[in-house]
Image: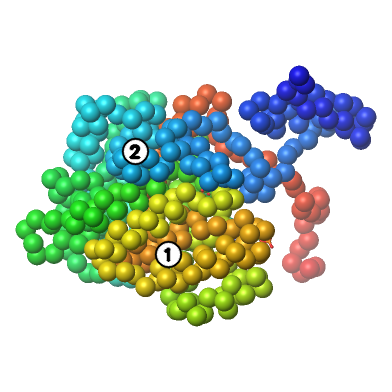
Amino acid sequence: MSEDTLTVTDNRTGTTYEIPIQDGAIRAMDLRGIKVSEDDFGLLSYDPAFKNTANVRSEITFIDGEAGILRYRGYPIEQLAEHSNFLEVAYLLIHGELPSQGQYDEWVHEITHHTFIHENLKQFMDGFHHDAHPMGMLVSTVGALSTFYPEAKGLDDPDARHMQIVRLIAKFPTLAAFAYRHSIGMRYAYPDNDLSFSGNFLNMMWKTTELKYEPDPVLERALDVLLILHADHEQNCSTTTMRAIGSSQADPYSAAAGAAAALYGPLHGGANEAVLRMLDDIGSVEAIPEVIQAVKDGEYRLMGFGHRVYKNYDPRAKVIQELAHEVFEVTGKNPLIDIAVGLEDIALSDDYFVERKLYPNVDFYSGIIYQAMGFPTSMFPVLFAMGRIPGWLAHWQENLLDEEQAIVRPRQLFVGEGERDYVGIDQR
Ligand code: SDX
């Protein structure tokens, strides 16, 4: 049986090195021992966008991109979507195990009773322009939460960490709904502790003159499943941002604001919003062949398609597509789904997409459901972020407790100017 090592020869010196292989990886720091002279810094690994770099060891989420597998703490996403609920999944991601009934009841009670935000935050929210994008409002107000809870800097205290985790999961929906109500000029609808996590969010979004808002159970469940599907996805861009900010020991509110900012981008969590705009632009099934040709000509990127890790169908997209039909039973069919299904059918049989292993991802169908449920397109990335909060927090805490971790500070390959002398402006 061969050793779990890599034997490399540096042809610059003829020296051979044995580099240990562990968990399918070599340590980049082992490359530093490969030098051409004693005072040589040693080799770096160069990996733009970290396409082939693992910078953490994690027990939270497992993805097999080739097989289209996604598991939270070992549990397949399909089983969690069918049998669990969002708060139970949030507990699982953060604590590592499914809760007992007592643990679950206590967790739900804590989160239910921390949904209110400081009244001063409303003044902060009111300061935004009427047509401010709600994601921009969320990035700001989540960060502002850090100013109300200075004890959040107590990162070594597990009870203090737990309290901030509860507050962020509990208050994000309130901030999200308040951002929406601000954008349509409606008074804020306060949390209702008699409702479930998802039911209360619908209450804060849609309540008008009724004394007590009653969520439609099908839509309440559909939203809860969508939140489960978005709850974590290992080292994606926003989670990596959460870990990086947390590595400097900033508080979790500031880290979550940074993660939300990363998620806002159209290549990440902003894709669900971009998909709806794309489907609206396409307008009809008849226009699909022209769009596919534009993609193949490099003129157009099919939003909601492709993934850095999945080179197979995103398992979340399958669940969402099935969920859409349950939602349409209540809301009526969103005609955009015909365009989406038509795009998928053609793309999955076209060599351009097959060669590049481009499949629908989580964002391809989610926006169609959100729109059918009445959410404006601008709220889609906010809904994505609301689901991802527990995943961000689970990774933030895992990073803090990982003794191998330190402040994130990558190296660079400097390719700029060498030393040169200053030249006065009159001589330039
Ligand atoms: C999310 O990381 C995560 O886990 C993210 C996420 C999560 O839960 O956190 O899963 C959520 O962000 C899903 C992805 C949402 N984004 C989109 O749907 C935007 C559209 N998709 C892409 O821009 C793209 O597929 C990425 C950003 C998702 C992945 O990009 P990569 O891995 O950097 O791949 P690439 O851009 O290098 O593309 C490889 C090839 C290129 O062709 P060639 O240059 O080799 O000829 O595939 C092509 C790309 O042009 N390609 C696409 C395409 N995505 C990639 N061509 C058309 N349409 C697309 N969507």
The dot on residue 63 is none
Whether residue 210 is visible: yes
Residue 376 in which image quadrant? bottom left
Q: Point out residue 408 in the picture as x, y percentages from the top left corner.
A: 57, 37
To which quarter of the image does residue 46 belong? top right
Q: How many marks?
A: 2
Asked whether 173 or 250 is in front, the reply is 173
Q: Quadrant of the N terminus?
A: top right
Q: Quadrant of residue 177?
A: bottom left
Marks 2/1: CA–CA distance: 25 Å
Q: Residue at x 36, y 28 (%)?
A: 97
Residues under numbered marks 2 and 1 in contact, where contact means CB atoms less than 8 Å apart: no
Q: What's the residue at 50%, 61% (across, down)?
A: 304
Mark with earlier residue (2, 1): 2
Q: In the rendered structure, which amino acid carries the disc numbered 1?
A: Glu
What residue sits right under mark 2 in the picture?
A: 89
Instruction: Residue 7 in the image: state x and y as whole percent.
Output: 82, 27
Q: Position of residue 86 (x, y in %)?
A: 31, 43
Q: Position of residue 278 (x, y in %)?
A: 48, 71
Badge 1 is on which residue? 273
Asked whether mark 2 and ligand 1 are closer than 8 Å, the reply comes as: no
Q: Label 1: few (<14), some or many (≥20) within 10 Å? A: many
**Residue 176 or 72: which is nearer the viewer?**
72
Q: Residue at horizontal 6%, vertical 58%?
A: 211
Ligand 1 falls in quadrant: bottom right
Looking at the picture, which amino acid does disc 2 mark?
Val
Does residue 243 appear left or right of residue 41 in this picture? left
